[in-house]
Image (cartoon, coloured by chain):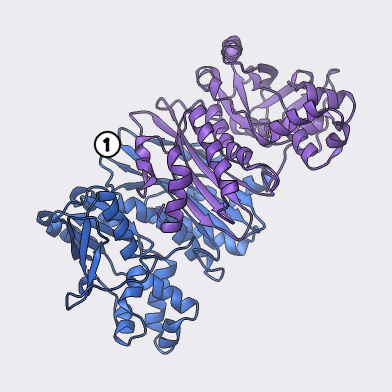
Chain colours: A purple, B blue
Amino acid sequence: MANNPSAEDSLIARYFKPLATDPGAFGLVDDAAVLAASGDDIVVTTDAIVEGVHYLATDPPDTVARKALRVNLSDLAAKGAAPAGFVLTLALRSKDDSWLRPFADSLGEDARTFACPLLGGDTVSTPGPQMISITAFGRVPKGRMVGRTGARPGDRILVTGTIGDAALGLDVLTGGTAARALTSDPVARDALVSRYRIPQPRNAVAQAVRDHASAAMDVSDGLAGDLTKLCAASSVSATVDVTRVPLSAAAAGLIGRNVSCVETLLAGGDDYEVLCTVPPAQCDALIAAGQAAGVAVTIIGTIVAGHERPRFLDGQGQELVLKRLSYSHF
Amino acid sequence: MANNPSAEDSLIARYFKPLATDPGAFGLVDDAAVLAASGDDIVVTTDAIVEGVHYLATDPPDTVARKALRVNLSDLAAKGAAPAGFVLTLALRSKDDSWLRPFADSLGEDARTFACPLLGGDTVSTPGPQMISITAFGRVPKGRMVGRTGARPGDRILVTGTIGDAALGLDVLTGGTAARALTSDPVARDALVSRYRIPQPRNAVAQAVRDHASAAMDVSDGLAGDLTKLCAASSVSATVDVTRVPLSAAAAGLIGRNVSCVETLLAGGDDYEVLCTVPPAQCDALIAAGQAAGVAVTIIGTIVAGHERPRFLDGQGQELVLKRLSYSHF
């Protein structure tokens, strides 16, 4: 917070001070915040979203705020960490109250919902696209962060929620085939758009992931690509039964009508679900913890020995050819 | 680090993996880093710099990298914290090796020099100006972060280094009066430009600040404005003897020639020195610690009771009228 002349100070006081509920934030009037660790490890993750790249200029400010925080909360969930707070860097083109007010209010609502208070930040002006960069902190007992390297042959592959909705939501918003196919189905359309704009981070199952998963990450760039990364980090391969990949009713409907295909959904971005590997004996416990928290957890495949890319098999056991594995914002 | 498709992964591996020397960074292949706290408090600070706002598009990439990290290291120094690491968000217009290579190499050099390793980050593309946002972490013994609220009447006001050089350096780079006055003095010109481009954070005196200061902050937006903020946070006022404010030879020369005036230097930005208040009995110890570390520490005034703005007195005891208190990037 070094660059905080009066204009920035008053903006911070007006919009963001109410979000700084943690005593370590000092009401945002100091240069730094204090994060009490109390013997835990602090898990640190950082993700930025850029207007026109990670969100659309037409997305409402309240969903932009939620997305900015939730993409980071999703990382914490996958690492098995309990949210502890976040810092915010906001690059603004203008100080328009009609944008900042709903942005700050929704950010504050999510900060409360997920028990992740604002600890500090920096507000800068930019002549370019707006950008929100968040660094979020979580706590895990010492040495207990869930990494990417622990997957072992025989572990089952599990995923939370449903896959591919956000990619279809973006397709709806940008006038793609899904938009045309859903003109007369506003319920499905809104459901998919909402999944693109407002990720549902799975913090409710973070502790169960920590207790049971051998490896985990969040699915943000496409299930196929992200599983490939996890397998590479663990020096293993995988087999996925594509018929088991959980789909929403809206997504299943579009596949049934051949508007979309499962390959596209497997490589679509912005799912923000937890992908994890779990020893067979512990799968039931994780699934039960998900049920208790209202989060679907589905077994979609198995880790196998080897260094090949994961194989995605259809209902006939035939391997799908994926033209691309993931969605690149870069 | 959720948005890390292959293009970003290879960029990270190529340029930034060598900087991730801390085991908690997991070689930048995980979604998150671990910061072991071991009973200390973690101090968190975040500062972003935007091309054309906080640095010039013509500034070399190596100095941009150093500035981005050092403005955060300066906050840690003023809070009495030992650097522990940082995360980096880089918004890039292009992936030009001739910019990224010196940027990453210099960032790595500074990370080593200041014992502040890269823990993670996010690289995003932007069609707008480049931006570097850094969140830096430091450690202090539990409850020992130096705040802004502890200044008491009678405490002396101390500042490290010299004041106003960076503002004059910016004036040189943007063709202002200082540029014209120094055409035939490349040594002074280069010294001032270097102070603008490459802050000298005072981490070498961080522990002495923690041991002796009642309140502290870094001077980033102008000494006058920053002291005003510190006094407001502590509910006190101050008297500064402007003749004691430490100036470099180059700055003193420009004032002697009436090219610049001290009021401008007091309100100039980008000093990145430590401003602190210290009980009289402890001033010598802090000054001695500075001497041992090669950092000048100068008494410039006294904290007084009251809620008025700090008064800046000239050699005749007359109050200077400051048209503005600080430099606003916003």
Q: Is residue B40 left or right of residue B270?
A: left
For image coordinates 90% across by 26% down, the residue present is: A257
For image coordinates 45% across by 48% down, the residue present is: A12
Give percent across and percent down for residue A38. Answer: 33, 29
For image coordinates 55% across by 57% down, the residue present is: B131
Residue toward you, A223 or A296: A296
For image coordinates 53% across by 62% down, the residue present is: B102
Residue that protrudes farthest toward the right in the picture? A257
Give percent across and percent down for residue A289. Answer: 56, 13
Q: How many marks?
A: 1
Q: Chain of mark 1?
A: B
For label 1, the residue is: B142
**Residue type, numbered disc 1:** Lys
Residue that protrudes farthest toward the bottom in the picture? B184
Give percent across and percent down for residue B62. Answer: 50, 64
Q: Is residue A95 left or right of residue B7?
A: left
SS at badge 1 = loop
Residue that protrudes farthest toward the left in the picture? B281
